[in-house]
Image (cartoon, rainbow, N blue to C red):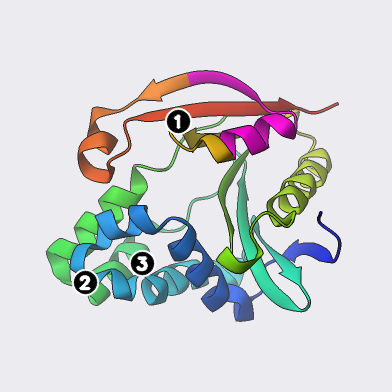
Amino acid sequence: MSEGVSVRPARPEDLGAMAAILVEGFRHHFEAAFKERVDRAERALARVLALETPRGLPGLYVAELHGQVVGTMALRRREDADIPTLPSTGIFVGELGLFGGLRAMFYLSLLDQPCGRSDVYVADVAVAGPVRRQGVAQAMLAHAEKIAHLWKKHRLVLDVEARNEAARQLYRRLGYTEERERRSLLTRWLLGIETWVRMYKRLT
């Protein structure tokens, strides 16, 4: 059930909660990237997200339940500008030192994937632990469809770890189709993730 869940564009005051939810939801990614300094991941991530504040945090959305931020999601088009690399790298280096910062930046960059001109790429769908399986992810994905229509795009696409069967079942239940598998020795070695599944939902 998603009763009571609302989805809206992110605001600057949401960034701390968003970073906490993302680090919790993708803990194994951040542990691989930050190693023994994973305790600094939330602060570093919030600072990186804040780089987009002057542009209005484009493509970032949060889910609220009872007035609390309980979920986060990013939507991206092929034509959208990326977060500036140099300032992001500077933040990671400041938090982790030169080697640790460059390592974290490189590891996390491996998660970025391209999408087509008619697609909206759905990323960083994460829900706070206490409210999982209460319809928060479904509400965010339904909102993604509305945004895709506003942007005049024809598909939603995403990548999910092949071993994350719970997420794959959720996406299939919401009308997504598995398009292809992608294997990466690099992400297997660095992140412990060998196989990814690209899924899409065609919009009418």
Q: Which residue is mark 1?
A: 162
Quick one: quadrant of the C terminus? top right
**C-alpha separation, residue under disc 2 versus residue under disc 1:** 30 Å
Q: Is residue 159 visible?
A: yes
Q: Nearer the viewer, residue 1 or 17?
A: 1
Crowding at dot 3, Cα within 10 Å, few <14 / some 14-19 / many 20+, comes out as few
Residue interval drawn in magenta: 167-180
Numbered circles on residues, count: 3
* Left or right of 98, for residue 110: right
Residue 153 vertical position relative to residue 53 in the rendered view, above or below: above
Depth order, front residue of 181/162: 162
Return the disc, 3 or 1, that comes first in the chain's sequence: 3
Q: Dot 3 lies on which element?
A: helix
Observer-side mark, 2 or 1, equals 1
Horizontal and vertical percent for residue 83?
A: 47, 57
Instruction: Give the residue number, with chain letter if any, for mark 2.
Output: 96
Question: Could you tell whether 130 is left or right of 139 in the image?
Answer: left
Task: Identify the element where label 1 is drawn.
Answer: loop
The answer to which of marks 2 and 1 sits earlier in the sequence is 2
* Amino acid bearing label 3: Pro
Q: CA distance from mark 3 to mark 2?
A: 14 Å
Q: Earlier in the sequence, mark 3 or mark 2?
A: 3
Residue that badge 3 annotates: 87
Tell me if residue 80 is in the magenta stretch.
Answer: no
Residue type at mark 2: give it.
Leu
Quarter where residue 12 is shown: bottom right
Residue at position x 21%, y 71% from top? 96
Type of amino acid under label 1: Ala
| Neighbourhood count class around disc 2 (C-alpha, 10 Å): few under 14, some 14–19, many 20 upward | many
Q: Do the numbered discs 2 and 1 sit on residues whose CB atoms are within 8 Å?
A: no
